[in-house]
Image (spheres, grey):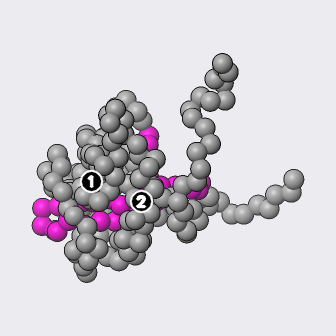
Amino acid sequence: MEKEFWKPGNMLYPLPAIMVSCASENRRPNIITVAWAGTVCSDPAMVSISVRKERYSYDMIKESKEFVINLVTKELVKKADYCGVRSGRDIDKFKEMGLTPIKGTLAMAPLIGESPVSIECKLKKIILLGSHDMFLAEVVSVAVDKKYMDQTGKFNLNKSDLIVYSHGEYYGLGEFIGKFGYSVKKKK
């Protein structure tokens, strides 16, 4: 197999495209769409998002020390894209996109009511990296949309039509392939 070598760059795709909601003392709530996000620890539950310093939400998160990660569905993808290309300095994204800010457990940052999962986060550390700084945060609460709960109490997140971001494009998730550990599961 022949490979072509490129200069160093981020090609770790696909990634979840998420809407991060935030607020601070003297600013209205805002939404920023990011793809640089991930799980970093399970106990305690911790996540990271990376944001450019010049983004309107950067200082809001830095000041309030909190934010909410809201998962994006096919139904929300156009709104998520809009929230990623328009600045909250100029517009109220909740109002423009018809999204519902919902009070959660945090002091300021609202959840997005239309998201199937909203992960409330308390900032632990800012890691200065270069083009983006990483906000390392502990998960303090997770809110889920009850419409994805079945009669047995199981949350069916994969029925919410989540999307991913890959090299500048959005995609729906594909078909079910297997379950964690299926490669070593004993056949009956």
Separation of marks 1 and 2 at Cα, in angstroms: 19 Å
Residue 97 picture location, percent across and down: 29, 74
Give the residue drawn at x 59%, y 50%.
175
| Above or below 108: residue 122 | above
Q: Amino acid at mark 2?
A: Thr
Nearer to the camera, 145 or 6: 145
- Per the image, label 1 sits on a secondary structure element best described as strand
Residue type marked 1? Phe
Q: Nearer the viewer, mark 1 or mark 2?
A: 2
- Observer-nearest of 77 and 39: 77
Q: Residue at x 35, y 39 (%)?
A: 150
Determine crowd level at label 1: few under 14, some 14-19, many 20+ residues with C-alpha closer than 10 A: many
Number of numbered discs present? 2
Magenta span: predominant SS is: strand
- Of the pair 60 and 153, the residue shown nearer to us: 153
Quarter where residue 93 is shown: bottom left
Closest to the observer, 31 or 78: 78
Residue position marked by numbered label 2 in the rendering: 73
The local crowd at label 2, few if under 14, some if 14 to 19, many if 20 or more residues have their Cα within 10 Å, is: many
Would you say residue 161 is visible in this rendering?
yes
Q: Is residue 112 above or below residue 154?
A: below
Residue 1 position within the rendered picture, expressed as x and y whole percent measured from the top left = 87, 53
Residue under label 1: 67
